[in-house]
Structure formats: structure tokens, C-alpha cells
Amino acid sequence: MFPLRSFLRPTRFQALRPAARLQPFRTPLQRPYYIQTPRPSSLGARIMFRPDGTRRSKLRGLILTSLLAGLGYATWATLLVVEALDYEHYLLSTLVYIQRVDYDYATVSFADFGAALAYFEELCGYFGQGDVSPEMVDAFFRDVATFAARDVVHAIVRDAAGAVHDVLAQSKGADATETAVLVINLVDDAMMALIQLAEDANSDETDKLLRVQRLRAQMKDSTKSYEILG
């Protein structure tokens, strides 16, 4: 017979087995119950509240608003810089064109009406950079050549060409954009004076009058403010 002590003694494997731990009794957690209110449909409510009716974070809204404001200001400043550069390019390119025409100033006989008018027409060639079509300018000067007030036209184009030449001769060391503004204003003023004469001379001819008025409108649309941008 087996001894009772050896029968009741735990085996080696049973002694090494860890004792089972009793898990404490836990009640299941209950989720908090929220009463959701519908968000109003107004724009202010959409900005202040989420779709579930809870209030949005004010700090996050402040940061987002600051970023959007900074982006808008940067875009606006960039557009101003681009516009200023485009304006300056227009002035400088026009000044270069007028200087090239002015190289022949000493070779032109301004006492002759035809020569003076042809020189001034060439001086107005920069109008093609804007909305004024070269064909309309050519047709305009063909009409001007037939005006009865030839002495008035002659004086306008001769004085304008001389004033432009004097400004260019005295512009050494001056700011190029300021010089461009001066000479462009001189040519534009003379051109507008000729347009006024054309309107008076063609008051009885509807086709020519409409063409001159269209030229005036195009010049106003294409003419810039000619103010030096800071």
C-alpha cells in the first residue's frame, strides 16, 4: 500500500504552478450622457459651434484667423509689388522708345509742316503698347494733315517735340522714371490737343467724329496715372 503522506504530497509540477489570482469584481463603466442641442443655421452659429452643437475652440479659431489674415496681407502686398514693377517697366520702355526717336531731332526740319507732323507721329508710336491700335493712330494723323487750321497743328507738334527734346537733354543724372513721366505727359497733352481740334473739325462728319471719339476713349483707358510709385 502507498503511504498516505506521499499520496497527499503535491507533485513537482503542481508546486511550480502559480496560484490563480482572484480578479476583483468591477462594474462596467457607463458613458456620460450628453444632451445635444441642434446648431442654429445662421452664419455666426456655424462659425462659433460645431455641427453637434458644441462650442468650437476659441484659441484654434484665433490662430486660424491670424493665418488667413497674414496670407491675405501677403497676397495683397505681392500684387502691389507686381503692379509697381509692371508700371515701372512701362515707363522705362516708353522712355527708351522716345529717346530713340529723339536721336533724329537735329535732322528734322521743323519749319516744314509735313516733316514736323511725321516726326510727332513717330513720337506717338508708343501708344501701341496700350489699347490704342496703330491703324487708328495712322488714320487719325492722315485726317490731321488735311485740317484747315494747319498753323495751329504745326505749332502743337513743333512745340511738343521741342519740349520733349529739352527734357531729355537736361535729364542727365535725373531719375529715369521721373523723366519718363515728364516726356509722356508732354506727348499725351499734345495728342489730346490734336484730338480736340479733330473733334471740332469733324463735327459735321459722323464717321470721322466717331473715330476720333473712339481714339480719345482708348487713350483714356490705356493712359496710366504717371505717378511715381514709392
Image: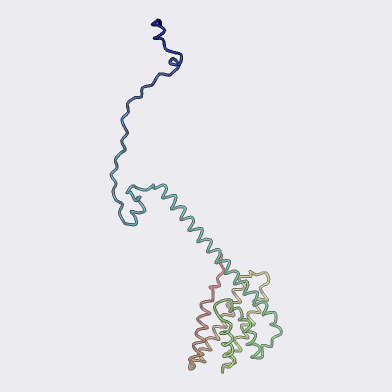
**Residue 159, relative to residue 9: is it above or below?**
below
Q: Residue 38 appears at what percent x and percent y?
A: 29, 51
Q: Quadrant of the N terminus?
A: top left
| Image coordinates for residue 54, horizontal then vertical, percent | 33, 47
The extreme front residue here reads 1
Image location (x, y in percent) of residue 138: 59, 86
Quadrant housing residue 81:
bottom right
Is residue 11 shown left or right of residue 226?
left
Along the line of sight, the residue nearer the viewer: 87 or 175: 87
Q: Nearer the viewer, residue 134 or 51?
A: 51
**141 left or right of 8 in image:** right
Residue 1 position (above or below residue 100):
above
**Image point (51%, 82%), residue name:** 216
Q: Quadrant of the C terminus?
A: bottom right
Q: Which residue is at a point 58% across and 82% down the rendered structure image?
A: 134
Residue 14: % across, % down: 43, 16
Q: Is residue 209 above or below residue 103?
A: below
